[in-house]
Every structure is written in structure tokens, then in C-alpha cells.
Amino acid sequence: MAVPVKPDSDRQCLQYHSKTVMGGCDSGNVEPLLHQIRHALQHLLSSGETTTIDLRGLPMAAGERERLLSFLGRGEVSVRLEALGRSDIVETGFSGVWLITHYDGDGEIMGRFIEITRIPGILETGTADLEDALASLQNKLEQH
Amino acid sequence: MNSGELLFWVRGTGLSIAVVIFTFGMLVRLLEIFMLGRRRNLAELRSNGIGAGLRTLIMRSIPPDRNSMRRSMVTVVAGYGFHIGLLVVIFLLAPHIQLFESLFGFGWPAISTPLVDLFAVVALISLIVLLWHRLTHPVVRYLSTPEDYLVWAASFLPLLSGYLAYHHLWLPYEWLLVTHILSVEFMLILFPFTKLAHAFTLFIARWYTGVIAGERGVET
Amino acid sequence: MSKATLERGVAILKEQINGPVAAYFSSCVHCGICAEACLFYTETGDPAYTPINKLEPMRRLWEQEYTLFGRLKKAIGLSQPVTDSELGEWSERVYDTCSLCGRCSMVCPVGNDISYMIRRIREGLAAAGHAPEGLVAASTRSVEIGSPMGLRLPALQAQARHIKESTGLDIPFDQEGAEYLVLLSSMEVINFPEYLQAIARIFKQAGKRWTLSSEAFEATNSGIQIGVSDIARELATRVVVAAEKLKVKTVISPECGHAYTAIRWEGPNLMGRRFPFKVQHILEVLDELRAAGLFKTEGMEDTRLTFHDPCQLVRKGGVIDQPRNLLNMVASDFVEMDDHGTMNWCCGAGGGVSAIEEAAGIKMKAFDRKKAQLEGLNVDTLVTACANCRIQLEEGLEENEMEIPVVGLTELLADHLVEDDSHD
Amino acid sequence: MKNDKPLGQLLKEQGVSRRGFLKYCATLASLMALPPSMVPAIAEALENARRPSVIWLSFQECTGCTESLTRSHAPTLEGLLFDHISLDYHHTLQAASGQAAEAAREAAMAENKDKYLLVVDGSIPLDNPGYSTIAGISNLDMLEEVAEHAAAIIAVGTCAAYGGLPHASPNPTGAVSVTDIIKDKPIVNVPGCPPIPVVISGVLAHFLTFGRLPDLDHLGRPLAFYGNNIHDRCYRRPFYDRGLFAHSFDDEGAKKGWCLYNLGCKGPVTYNACATIKWNEGTSFPIEAGHGCLGCSEPDFWDLGGFYNALPESPVDISRLAAYGIVGGAAAGVASGLLNRQKKAQATATHETVNLSDLKREEKS
């Protein structure tokens, strides 16, 4: 995953602050976010309801997002979607915590979400697509 | 007038009016006191009174003894809370220091804003206690004039609006900032004409009292 | 013949307002702390007796006459002029319920010397004819007879003869070149003749030459209490003239509070000149003699005793350590009251209050403060150094059925004096 | 130009899959600062939405706003959006010119009467209509004409929203904002110099999705983007709270990335989304680049006391005024003091000695 890292600002921040679990210059948003993820996991287990967190709405200092991602780490599932540009759907080191990154055709990030779910909704095949698929398969078989 | 224009006005024209009235008025008041003067004491003095004057200048900031303090506990504790809180907020909050720096050409280090915030809360609570005391204590209620309540409000408003502005409560920040600066200007304008002037004249009062007593060999 | 009028009172108040007064009025924040230091408030709970409130007419006059903004306020009718009836109403607050004890001046957080101003507002009230009758009468006797209690010289001479007869001690009159001119308060002469005898004995032991003046033996000064500087000056002048005539080195103020203030601190300022002699309180003189080893005592009082500081000596006079030094010579069980020294509570009768008949009731009410102080202390004897305090203390104790004898410190010392006849 | 097919169908025809559409809706929701839980509702609304006609008028402006929008063009989200609106008139972007262009505008107006969106950038001069004209038509006339049958108006950029740079003192052209002229249409202001591109598209997307303008603040700005001030969302805010400030652009504080408040940052009084959305595809924003916020999304930001004066600083020379006050006060104080002394001296001079007899009052009969 090509995440642009800004080592310079990152280093500067780390040098002067060591306040949070992540260690580093921050907006103070990372730790609460991690706790929010923990609560969402609990909620998923107990009620089955999923949670989506939009990372765009959270102010983060340079380097902070990178530290968040490295904290979450990478798990065993990694899916690449090609629809209106690339999308990466990756299960983090914590099962059920997914990181979804949407890119546009130029490879610029359009949106980044953390989803706490058994399987991200966007991966499920929609009913309309199933119907189309059925029709299309039938059509192909009939042509044979 | 939108908030930006109003903010510009209070920071410029408004502040100008307030500062001119404040400096003009305070200087008139101080000169009026100094020019009335005090006749030379012809009695054989026990001391020239200067040491005693300086001592009283400082020592009057604390009650003379435990019993006196106990008798006026509410006023003493809330009085300290208010004055210390107010002084910390005025002189140790970063944006205020910035203002002083732009006025005097020099500044000093600020303390952490959340800490200043705590002092602001202390000052606000103290003021509320003092108002309650003024409304309920027979002596203070008896002494109180409309001016006392006006001055209370003039002291409370800058603190409250500053506190709300910092926490982004109630109104948009810039409106609170406008309210805050306006209320400070209101206070500056009231300053020379009300008991707010005590912030300056109390030093003259303490000095005179200390000197008068010191000449007689009494420590006050 | 001129008469008291509002106009004269206001004119005199204008004279009385000076820099300190202006600074004090500018600084008051109406906090009410001064009330808690005033026994006329603490014992009655009447907020009108709050010390700073006793100055309201003078405050308004200051604002209207001596501040730019006050003049504007007055011009547009925001500030009402001082009226005659207002001054009349304030008379009780300024005279009956203020003993000029100065305790409020000690606690004011902005440092206002409130009693300094009460002394001054009395000038205006007196000139406007609102001084209490009792004080007017005392002043009249002082000026016309020479003593506020109407005591004349023959009575004093009779007492001197009596001392000579009972002790063989000479009471010197009009001795030119004596070191000390001793002043008396008529209260002492009438109620506590032991005082005169005591100093005669002590001076004899100390080998000091002293004298009384037949022209000016009275130390008290009603002019100070009523607040008429012109009368105070006249009374002080008598003492100064006598002292200069007798060429004494030191004038001794007796066991009295305001007499000391009158001659020691106000005298030179009233007369507009320095004195060629020193003025000392008797306790100051005795403490000097003690320090120089000029008189000795024997035996100790073994009863538990405490000392009541006369306000004018501690807060207005700076005589604080001397009585304690002297008491330690003769007392083995000396205890201090909870509030003592510069923070002592007034007996309730100073500043002319004892001369005001209308104040008789409130004066006794004010004594409750002293009573409370004494109750916690369990003492057998109460010592003081002011005849006026002493009378109030005795009356108060009797009224409250407390059997504590009150003695003057000078007499107590004389009781333990080592008398060595070789001085004869 | 007219196209009545719903958006969902149009996208499908272009080969946009269901997943692609969902992704599009998710990013739209994010763009409009709507909670991710709203995505299904957005998807449904968009599927059935029809592309609107847009007429874009540029008055006294610098093209910066259009630049801002096109910098981030196809095939980004903005591109996608503009593919699906019908931009019928934009004299900078359109190929047509002269009479053909004006004809296109009039045609679009006629075809989509009361349904088209009007986007305006630039302020309108009122002093002399000749200051700015298009095809001989004054800006004021053109705005009034096009606005009359617009469904809604989007004032893009601080010039259109609040008068902008042309309105700056002394405002030589008498420039005013759209809201100063048009009073009877829903108007949304998207201020900024220039505005963040995704904010422009976000507002368009909102209109597309919900068929109405988003919720606005007291200055007519969409709350979704202008609801927070820069200061509150700034990553340097912790330094402010700790009292750590840069005092010049090259001091230790500046190097350490401390708060720029003292260097004139207007973040605390500026409402915009720069600190969260950032610029250049989310790369950075002025404060992150080491320069304080100028407050460009606020009315009259250039006239408010200087970009490099810290907020509490007064735009006037208070020290000098204080000196005047002191000098005047000294003069008046001495005068009053002398008057007082004279009054007191007079009272003393006329003092009649108070005798015993004076203590008695003349009894009034």
C-alpha cells in the first residue's frame, strides 16, 4: 500500500512530544479513535451491528495517520477492487477491523474509512448484480 | 455589521475610545488625590514611616490575624479566588500577553492554557459567591449601591465571555470574542469613575495608612 | 455671635478632606470587612454601624467637591448634596457608636484608615451643631473650668496633702527645671488617687525630679473627642505653655488613651510647631526607668492576670511592648487575651463615648465583646493603663456580675516597689 | 443538452458498476460531512436524480475559483460530478464564444426555466455598470436576468459571497456580493480565496442528492464545511493550549511547528474546512506549510487589521492613544487638582474659629 510518508515532519514531532500511546506529535485524535474502534468491536460482537468511521473528518497531524495505520498493522485479507479507480480493502492486524481506501483514476486518495464488520458491505454482491449475472450466464449458456 | 467588521471595530475604534477614557480618567483621579496631599507631621516621629508604608503596601494583601480572617471568611476566600484568578487570567494567558507585547513592546512567558482556564473558573465561581454574599449578608447588602452591582457585572462579563469564547460555548467564537473585548472596554471605561479605581488607589491608601501609623511606631 | 450651621460644617469638612481621605474613599469596595472589626457592629448586628458607612456624608462631599467626575455627577443631579438632617442622623453613628479605636483601620483590605476619617468628620458635625450634648458639656467644662469633669486645682491640692499625710511623700507643684511634668486625668484624680501616689513613690526611688503644674494638670482633651481642633488647640496650648514655663525635659501623659494622642501626636500639629520637650506616656517612662535599672520590684503577683490594651496606646500610639515588659517584672501568671496588642478589642467607651449619656446603653452592649474575651481566659485580675477604659471595665464587669478586679499598671508596679529609704 | 435519464442509469450506461457507485456514494457522503450510515440513502437518491443544468457567471474575479475547481479535474470525483451535470455556460471553460455562447446561455435558461442552478464567481460593481460587462451586458443586468428563473444560486468564492477583493477599502468599483443584490432566491455562499474544490462539488452533490441546498450558517455558508473554525480542527491546536508559539517565521518555535497565533494566524475566527479536507488532494494546508491562516473565507478578511498582526493586537496604535490619554489626563488632573487646592485654601482662609458657643445650634422657630 503506497502511503505517502512525510518523514521530516514526523521526526520533528516525535522529537518533542511523547504524550500518547502512539508517541508523537498529535491532534489528540488517535487515542480516542482507537478506543472508538475497541467499542465498535465489542458492539459488533454483542449486537452484530457494524460501524463505519470516516477518517477524513478527523484532523490529524502530519505523520499521525501513518502511525495509526502502522499501529493497526495488516492482517491476512487484502482485496483490491477496480471500480472507478482502485480501492484497497484490507483487514488490519485486528480481525474485523477493515481499512478501506478509495482511489480515483489518477491514484489520488478520495476517501479512507475504517469499517468494523465481518465483511465490508462493498464486497458483497448486490441483488441487481446477481440478477444481471444470472441473466448473463443464462444467455451465454443458451448461446452454446 | 458582520462579526468581522464588529471585531475590527472593537479591536480598533472601540479599544481606542476605552483606552483613552481609561488613561485620561485614571490620571485625573490619581492627580486629584496626590494634589490634595497631606500636611507634614510636626510631632516627634518614631520613624519616617517609609518602611512602614512599604510594609503596609504588601502586608494588607493578607488579613492581619486569624480571628479577623475567620470573621470574614467568605469575603477573604472568595476575594482571593477572584483576584488571583483574575490576575492569572489577565497576565498569564497567551493571547493577553500577545496584546501586552504589542502595546509595550515586551512580553513574558505564558502558562498552559488549560491551567489558565482553571483559574478563570475559580475567578468566576468566586465572583458568583461574592454576589451571593453581597445579596445576603446584612452588612454588604446594606452598603451596596447600584454601582456595586454594575461593577460586579463589569468584572464578571469579561471573564465569562472569555471563558465561553475559549470553550466555544453558546455563540460562535468571533461573536464571543467581540463580546469579550467589548466587555473589557466597558470595564476600562467604567474604571476611573467607579470603585474599580481601587486597583490603583489602594496602593496610595495603604501607603498613607502605613506611613501615618509608622510615624507613630505602629505596624499596620 | 456665630452659630453652628450646615454651611460651617460643610466648609470645615472641605478643610478636612486631604490626600489620604481622597485615596481612602477612592479605594473602598464595600466589602464589609470593617464591620467585623467594629464592636459596635459585632455586638448589635446593625449594619448601619459599619465603620465606612459612618463616613457617607463626607464621602459624598469629597466626590462632589474634589473629583472632576463627582462635580459632573452633581451638576446633572446624580448626586444629592449633603443636608443638615443627614448630618443630624449621622451624629449617632459618628459619636455614640465609634470609640475611634481604629480596629477597622487594621483590617481594611485596601488599607483605609477609617478612624482617621472619623476623627475628621467629627469636625464637620461639631461645626454644624450635631455634636452630642454630653461632649459639648465636657468641652465647656474643659475650657471654662480646666477639666472635663469640672475638677479644680484645690481638689488636686487637697489630694496632694492627703498623700503627704498618709505617706510623707511630697507632691511637687510648679517646680521649675524638673525633668518631668506629670499630667493627670481628672478621672484618675477623682476615681483612682492611687496613681498619683504610685508615681510619687516610683520617681522617688528612681531619683528623678518631677512636678505638677498648677496651671495645667489636666491631660485629657475634649477637643480631640468632640472633633473641634480649635478647642483642642486651646487645651493643648495650656499644657505646652506650662511645660515651657517650667522648662521640663519631658511631659508625661497619664494612664489615659486619648490624652496621649492629643498631646503626643496631635498637639504639635494643632499648634503648628514642634515642642522643645519630649512627650511620653507614663508606661514609656516606667519602661525606660526599668531598663536603666532605676527602680526595682520584689515579689510576684501569683494570681492569673491579663492586660487590656488601650486602643489609643497600641493602634494610635505605638506603646505596645512597654506594658508587657513591665508586667513581666511583677506577674508570674500573665496571659494574653485572644486578640491583643494592635488587634485588641476596645472597651467600648473610648473616643468620647463615655461622655455621651445617650450612649450609655450601647456602651454596655459593646462591652459584651470584652466580656467574651475575658470569659475564655479565666483570669483573677485585669490590668490596664487608661482610666477611661478602667471605669468602663469596672462598670461592665459589675453589670455582668463578673468579679474581676481592675487595676492600673502603674499602681501594680508601685505595690511591688522596693523602697530604699536612702533616697530621702 | 437536455437529458432526462436518472443519474444511476447514466452511470450504468457508462460502465460504472454497483460497487463503483457505492464507492462514489461513500466518498460523496464523506465529502458532505454526512455520517457513513447515510450512504444507502444517498445512493438511492442519486440513482433517481436527474442531471441539472448549470449556468456559471463570472464577474469581477480572477478565475482563481475556476482554477481551484479545475485543478482537481477529471477523472476525479469532481470530474465525475461535472460529467453528470450539464454545465451549459461557463465563459472560461466553454468552447463557444461571442454570440454563440450567449445563445447557449439563453437556450439553457429557456429550457430549464426555474430548474437550473446558477453559479456565480466574482463581485458585481455598482458604481458604474461599465466597469465590468460581458457581451455588452453589465454584470448587474446579467445577474438579475439569470437569477430570475434560477432554482438556486451558489456564490463561489469570497468575491461572489461577500464582495471579496474588489470590495476591499476603498472599494473603487462599488463592488457588492450576490446576496447584496438577489434577495428572493436560495443562495449558498462558498467563500474562500479560492474555496476548497471539494466544497464546491460537495454543495453541488448535495443539491443533486437532495434537490435542495444544504444547511447554512449565519453567513450563508454550508455548515457541513464551515461549521468549525480552523483553530479547533488544527493539528497545531495542542501547542496553543500549551502556550507554545512561534514568534517569527524562522525561530525555534516555527521550526518545531508550534502554533502560529502570534504570527497573525486567523484560524480562531475563520470558519472553513482547510484543516480537515486540506488542499491538493489532502496534501497540506497553509498552517501545515508554516503560514498562518489569512481568514479568506470570512467577510472583509483583508481589511481586518493585517495578516501578520496577532488576533488580540489592535489595528490601531494603542500606545500612542494611551499617551494622548495620559497627557490629557495629566492636564485635566492638574487643573482639577489646582481647583481643589484653591477650594480647600479658601475654606481654610475663611475658617472662623469654632468656639464653645458655636457648638450650639440656632434653634429654628
Image (cartoon, coloured by chain):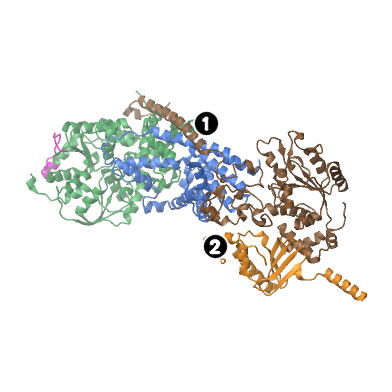
Chain colours: A orange, B blue, C green, D brown
**Residue C336's disc number:** none
Based on the picture, tell me whether residue C172 belongs to the magenta stretch: yes
Side of D252 relative to B70 (left or right): right
Horizontal and vertical percent position of residue D32: 72, 57
Quadrant position of residue D123: top right
Q: Which residues are magenta?
A: C163-179
Q: Hey, what amino acid is under mark 2? A: Leu
Quadrant of the image containing the C terminus of chain D = top left
Identity of the residue furthest to the top in this view: C1
Horizontal and vertical percent position of residue B26: 47, 37
Side of A3 relative to C376 (left or right): right
Secondary structure mainly formed by the magenta segment: loop
Horizontal and vertical percent position of residue C269: 29, 33
Q: Is residue B21 visible?
A: no
Q: Secondary structure at mark 1?
A: loop
Same-subunit check for callouts 2 and 1:
no
User: Residues under labels 2 and 1: Cα distance?
Assistant: 68 Å
Identify the residue position indicated by label 2 in the image. Answer: A14
- Label 2, residues with CA under 10 Å away: few <14, some 14-19, many ≥20: some
Q: Hey, what amino acid is under mark 1? A: Gly
* D167 or D148, nearer to the observer: D167
* C414 or B167, nearer to the observer: B167
Give the mark count: 2
- Label 1, residues with CA under 10 Å away: few <14, some 14-19, many ≥20: few
Side of D360 relative to A45 (left or right): left
**Residue C77's disc number:** 1
The answer to whether the residues at label 2 and label 1 have Cβ atoms under 8 Å apart is no
Q: Chain of mark 1?
A: C
